[in-house]
Amino acid sequence: DAGITQSPRHKVTETGTPVTLRCHQTENHRYMYWYRQDPGHGLRLIHYSYGVKDTDKGEVSDGYSVSRSKTEDFLLTLESATSSQTSVYFCAIGGTGGPGYTFGSGTRLTVV
Amino acid sequence: AQSVTQPDIHITVSEGASLELRCNYSYGATPYLFWYVQSPGQGLQLLLKYFSGDTLVQGIKGFEAEFKRSQSSFNLRKPSVHWSDAAEYFCAVGAQGSGNTPLVFGKGTRLSVIA
């Protein structure tokens, strides 16, 4: 993938604990996104960012917060993880009218 | 707001047979349209996109898609499927002329290829 990495790749956490997922890009792109992928639901937008400290909510933002203090990093935080947040999380960069999004490899999160 | 529907959850085709995956969108103006492919355990890879102009677009791996405004469709086609095409395919729609509204993805179509 072109300069976008997600960490960790896999995580198992307990209900009620906070979790932070990191997306790091080296493309200096303005726009970054967090999606979650669940069977039967496809990809659903959680939050996105259109610049440092500029973020907005997506379709399924409840229970999630984000931060972007540097162009290259976009953090997704689950303040108190629940089993319904077990999912695969994808970060993406790119503009809607550009060459399409570039996706990271995903983070598989399991909340037990 | 835009939306996209992929009517087929799962399709099985024989290797060498032709393929068509359906995508219908809802948007009041000309949309941006994309097809992505996801191999098991991997991220999404862009196959092709439509912004304007020629309604038949060519992509990677021998795929093509045709934008039909009258039917609000952007179906993906391949004349001869290979076993390596087995994957999940996502159609996505974006809003032209509305800033950078994020893409909306369909629920995906899983393609199985049999010998």
Image (cartoon, rainbow, N blue to C red):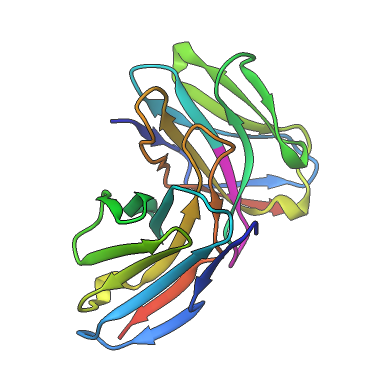
- Identify whether A70 is placed above or below B58: below
Out of A66 and A46, give the one closest to the viewer.
A66
Would you identify the image quadrant in which residue A89 lies? Answer: bottom left
Magenta span:
B35-42
Q: How many marks?
A: 0
- Identify whether A95 is placed above or below A75: above
Q: Quadrant of the N terminus of chain A?
A: bottom right
Judge left or right: residue A105 versus residue B4.
right
Out of B87 and A12, give the one closest to the viewer.
A12
Q: Residue sitting at 27 percent across and 49 percent down? A: A58
**Residue B61 part of the magenta-drawn span:** no
- Identify whether B2 is placed above or below A94: above
Q: Residue sitting at 34 percent across and 51 percent down? A: A48
Would you identify the image quadrant in which residue B84 lies? Answer: bottom right
Q: Residue sitting at 58 percent across and 45 percent down? A: B36
Out of B96 and B13, give the one closest to the viewer.
B96
Instruction: Please state the horizontal and vertical placement of residue B87, each as a whole percent of the image.
Output: 62, 54
Judge left or right: residue A77 versus residue B80.
left
Q: Residue sitting at 46 percent across and 36 percent down? A: A96
**Residue B41 part of the magenta-drawn span:** yes
Instruction: Please state the horizontal and vertical placement of residue A29, each as a whole percent of the image.
Output: 51, 49
Out of A110 and B5, give the one closest to the viewer.
A110
Q: Quadrant of the C terminus of chain A?
A: bottom left
Q: Residue furthest bottom?
A: A14
Judge left or right: residue B37 versus residue B97.
right
Instruction: Please state the horizontal and vertical placement of residue B94, each as a whole percent of the image.
Output: 42, 32
